[in-house]
Amino acid sequence: TNEPALRAVIEAWAAPLGAAEAIARLEAEGIPAAPIWDLAQAARSPQIAARQLLCRRETAALGALDLPEQPALFASYARGAQAPAPDLGADTADILATVAGWDQARIAAFVDLVSTLKETD
């Protein structure tokens, strides 16, 4: 293929220019061009902000997190409506009661047993 030779020509042309200048020259000639960003740069981009693709949420364990939103915007889905995942064990009692049918005494005994096991690790 011609890809290695083409890559060498493009790299030789672009190397002394820097990304911003290379992009400006390409765009001036009607050639679509854009920088290649890492994840942090992309997250700070004006396009991400304009489309509200990140939603800041506070978590007990990790503090503030920027959570990704659904990329497609639906009229019935408000941006920022999602919440971070619950802390480990936050829903244990409710699940044991509603799914397993355990009563509060059995749940309390189970939680005590698990906490005892954690202490021996």
Image (cartoon, rainbow, N blue to C red):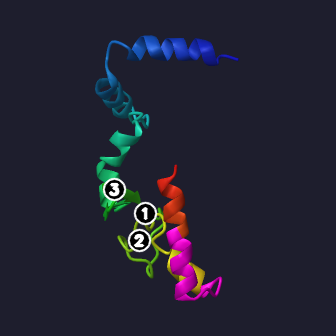
Tell whether position 104 is magenta: yes
Q: Nearer the viewer, mark 3 or mark 1?
A: 3
Label annotation for residue 65: 3
Distance, label 3 to label 1, CA atoms, is: 12 Å
Query: Which one is in front, 63 or 83?
Result: 63
> Mark 1 falls on what kind of element?
loop
Q: Give the mark nearer the N terminus: 2 vs 1.
A: 1
The residue that appears at 51% across and 79% down in the rendered structure is 108
**69 on left or right of 106:** left
Kind of residue at disc 3: Leu
Instruction: List x then y, in percent, for residue 63.
Output: 29, 56
Report the residue at 43% width, 63% height from top: 69
In the rendered structure, which segment of residues is drawn in magenta?
A: 98-112
Q: Would you say the residues marked 2 and 1 are in contact, meaning their CB atoms lie under 8 Å apart? A: yes
Pointer 2 residue: 82
Which labelled disc corresponds to residue 69? 1
Q: Earlier in the sequence, mark 2 or mark 3?
A: 3
Would you say 70 lies left or right of 81 here?
Answer: right
Q: Residue at x 45, y 71 (%)?
A: 90
Q: Are marks 2 and 3 in contact (CB under 8 Å)?
A: no
- Residue 120 lies, with reference to residue 88, above or below; the image says above
Q: Secondary structure at mark 3?
A: strand
The type of residue carrying mark 2 is: Gln
Instruction: Residue 49 in the image: state x and y as whole percent.
Output: 30, 56
Q: Residue at 41% of width from left, 65% of height from top?
A: 84
Neighbor class of circle 2 (other Cα within 10 Å; few <14, some 14-19, many 20+) is some
